[in-house]
Image (tube, grey):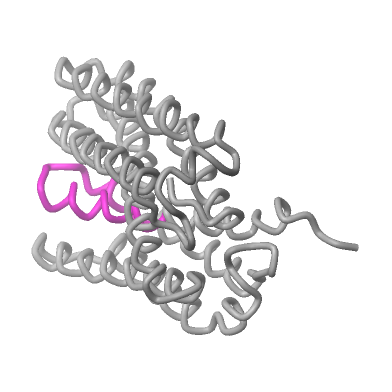
Amino acid sequence: MTVPPLVQTLPFVAWILLATLAMGSFTFVVVTQALSDVTPGYVRFSAATAAILALLTVLMTGGLAGSDALVIKPGATADSSLLTLILAIFVVVALVYAFAGGSARVKTGLGAIGVAVGLVALARAALAWAPTTADAVPLLVQLAVLSFVTGGSLAAIVLGHWYLVTPKISERPLLLQCRMLLAGLIVQALLFVTWTTLGGGPGQGPFDAFTSGPVLLVILRLVITIAFPIVLTWMAWRTARTRSMESATGLLYINFAAVMAGTIGAAALYVSNGLLV
């Protein structure tokens, strides 16, 4: 019995979603800890959550299987041992970062190591899955930006909840994360324009995303999962400035849902059609 291509994409989509949540949320935690007065409890909880998400990614890695019906061919996933090892190192570093003591400088250095290991894991996945090394470069850029935005959205809603139970903490951490998230979404919008007008995916030419394949999904990707989150994040930043943290957290929840949908859609379009959007 032949498995439909849509079903074959699901393991890769799930892997990308888990990996981007883990890498991005950890990056946001490290930056927020280094540049603001965020509480240690938030740092421990969020870093541990990133480690758990990365562990789930490790467990999925060995079960990935490419297909002739996908951009990711069967041989691309034949040896997943190196990717598994890199992800396992990230899990260990994230856990040590979460629970180890030491000065803020030591903590930041350890966090930087974790961010670098996460980026190496994404680079390994891009090199293994893309048809050529040249194709791996734009895929790595896409995975890195997806991580920053998707994981950053998760980190921001967790931080928003922290204000609900610890209302007297400074608003600076959430304002910082909103600015980071807004910058990431703007970069994502610029990349969307670049990918769709100039090409980027394997064999993707100028405007191919609008002239072939699931055009409606491409349009929804831009309007609902990039432009809409930009507006929501800006509104959350404005709201957080007035210390209306419940309202800001609600806006960030809607943003998280839209961003998650966008990450799933972008991953599926690449794996099944070779489109970067």
Q: Is residue 38 magenta?
A: yes
- The magenta segment is 22-48
Kindly indicate the quadrant of the structure image that contains residue 135.
bottom left
The C terminus is located in which quarter? top left
Whole-percent x, y for residue 149 in the image: 34, 44
Residue at the image position 33 percent from the left and 73 percent from the top: 120
- 110 or 141: nearer the eye? 141
- 206 or 20: nearer the eye? 206
The answer to whether any part of residue 45 appears in the image is no
Which residue is most to the right?
1
Residue at the image position 57 percent from the left and 50 percent from the top: 268
The answer to whether any part of residue 145 appears in the image is yes
Total label count? 0
- 106 or 84: nearer the eye? 84
Whole-percent x, y for residue 11 in the image: 64, 59
Kindly indicate the quadrant of the structure image that contains residue 230.
top left
Whole-percent x, y for residue 200 in the image: 39, 56
Kindly indicate the quadrant of the structure image that contains residue 65.
bottom right
Whole-percent x, y for residue 56 in the image: 55, 62
Magenta segment, principal secondary structure?
A: helix
Q: Is residue 42 magenta?
A: yes
In this picture, residue 229 sits left or right of residue 106:
right
Image height of 102 relative to 83, above or below: above
The N terminus is located in which quarter? bottom right
Residue at the image position 28 percent from the left and 27 percent from the top: 233
Residue at the image position 52 percent from the left and 51 percent from the top: 267
Image height of 64 relative to 191, above or below: below
In this picture, residue 143 sits left or right of residue 10:
left
